[in-house]
Amino acid sequence: MSEAANSLIRATADHLSQFAPFDQMEGGHVQWLAQHATLRYFAKGETVLSPQQTEPVAFFIIKQGVVQGEQGISQPPEDSAWLELHEGECFPLGALLAKRPVTGTYRASSDVFCYVVPAEDFLYLTRLSEAFYDFCTRRIANLLEHSQHLIQAGYSKASAEQQSMNSTLAAIVQRQPVTCSPHDSIRQALQLMERHGVGAMVAVDDQVPLGILTLHDVLSRVALAEADLDQPVIGIMSTTLTTLPPHSLAHDAALAMAKQGIRHVLVTDNGHLTGVISEKDLFTLQRVGLHQISSSIRHATTIVLLKQCARDIQQLARNLLAQGMAAEQLTQIITTLNDLLTTRIIELELQGDPARDIEFCWLALGSEGRFEQTLNTDQDNGIIFAPKANEDPVALREVLLPFAKRVNLALAECGFPLCGGEVMASNPKWCASLQEWQGTFDKWIYHGAPMDLLHSTIFFDFRPLYGASHLGKALRGWLQTAAPKNSRFLHQLALNALRNRPPLGMLRDFVTGDDHTIDLKLNGITPFVDAARIFSLAIGGTQTNTVQRLREIAAPLNLKPGDADAYCEAFLFIQLLRLRFHHTQSERGETLTNRVDPDTLNHLDRRILKEAFRQARKLQTKLGLDYQA
């Protein structure tokens, strides 16, 4: 072989190695592929592959340009989604593996150059390269694994930087300092320390620190010294203070503590107190654990302490991303901890309240009901109660509503905004008896118009969170029996669901709005959530989580195992993308949103997102076929 030919093969192999799955294959196998590939040109509008083609199907890898995939009218509608394939993407894997013609038409939507490999060489390569075979048979799963490795590497680096002694004190400070006046009594200062759960109290004058009292000081200077608790606290405080600016490093604070034998350093900016760093802060450095957070929540006595727990939950989510945790497990952990936090708020607000004498169940709705909360979620909740004989539901509701309002407001303080649609327990419509809830569901199922059902779907994701869980289970049992009986109801839900299509374009990768963004929640997550919910209601399913619903419906609906897995993987990738996006926004101090500019995504994430949207379209196609919607 000439040197020129060798150079061309090496250049081809180098180009292919920039893209999945070729970047995961052994170099010799990529060289073999390059050696057996020929370069072909297709003019704009020219057909690359079609069902009418008589010659054997070959393996195509796009070198340059865009190929549009379209299914013919006579083909099965489950594959009718448009595809737009770009540089580095390959096709048609399904036809090659099944040794059949393609079922759709692939057309050049621009001038296109493709590497073309004969079918027999493609099949030989699947036997030669395990990485290539794995990609071809588990395309979306393989891409997800590749993306996850890149994500983990990026977050691990950020996490390592954050959790090192090179962290700035500004990054370590987790809460506003708790302060008092130098003229406050010792008793007042101790009460503040207990109320806020802090180990140090700083006396300030116009935010300038004058003294510090620690729990260690309390033992020696107050308890053992039998100090008068009504004297000014400044009299027993340490007034020799160690201060550092916010840009100082954790290392500097640790060194000061070691040198001076102290446990706290004050962080000051231009002389004004901005935070207190303890010895514990330095040597845990935000290594927040599940046990620590759950324990803190269970023992919290104030909303202020629970607000700190809510911040810890967000930090834990970032750390778990760094450890490579998958979206399914991560959203379940976030939701579980949020459940604990909600439960603790309910317990605190019930203390001494007449609502505690009523048999009721607090319901989680929407994403919390589905165990799918991310870091950008508002409240969706309700109350179901059980009147005793001769008790008036209206009177019971009047007792429960003020309590529910306090819980909703406390949740808002902890970072869960009030629901804009007022789907909250403090709304009289969603604080109802079991009989009333059944009546509402009955109206939706048997008499609801499509628009009536448009905003009701999140209620079908309910699950018991606190209190008399048997009430929630009774409502679920009733729904499992009632919903499958009414095909009109399911048809109308399907009509509503199919109004929201994944944003795949015919002329571009993605259909974007005027701001050139797509909504990962509305257009990405929701199509899977809606379809899984409808199919679950149709079979009388017991699950509320979307992935668990997709797995539960697979057998009753005769879904191919590979299809069910692909739906789950696609849904979870979009969830993971949302989590990453929210973290990036949080780090930048931006308002959390689900809108993302696809041009900001790397090549691999764009490729997986397109495949994920295609899976959503495929699931919607089945929904439309099953319910003639």
Image (cartoon, grey):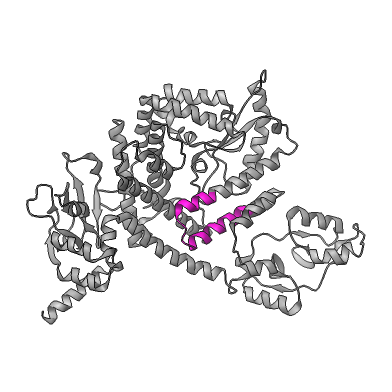
Task: Give percent across and percent down for residue 280.
Answer: 68, 67
Q: In which quarter of the image is the N terminus?
A: bottom left
Q: Residue furthest top?
A: 390
The residue that appears at 66% across and 22% down in the rendered structure is 388
Residue 371 appears in the rendering: yes
Residue 514 appears in the rendering: no
Left or right: 272 with respect to 457?
right
Give yes or no for residue 428 being in the magenta stretch.
Answer: no
Q: With respect to residue 159, does 375 lie above or below?
A: above
Task: Give percent across and percent down for residue 367.
Answer: 49, 43
Left or right: 459 with respect to 67?
right
Please provide the residue range marked out in magenta: 309-334
Task: Give percent across and percent down for residue 141.
Answer: 34, 55
Q: Which residue lies furthest to the bottom in this view?
A: 3
The residue that appears at 30% across and 48% down in the rendered structure is 562
Q: With respect to residue 323, does 495 lie above or below?
A: above
Left or right: 330 with respect to 517?
right
Choose between 616 and 143: the one closer to the eye. Answer: 143
Look at the magenta stretch and give its main secondary structure. Answer: helix
The residue that appears at 43% across and 54% down in the rendered structure is 576
* Location of residue 180 (image quadrant): bottom right
Q: With respect to residue 446, does 596 lie above or below?
A: below
The residue that appears at 74% across and 70% down in the rendered structure is 263
Task: Give percent across and percent down for residue 157.
Answer: 48, 69
* Location of residue 392 (image quadrant): top right
Q: With respect to residue 498, does 84 lie above or below?
A: below
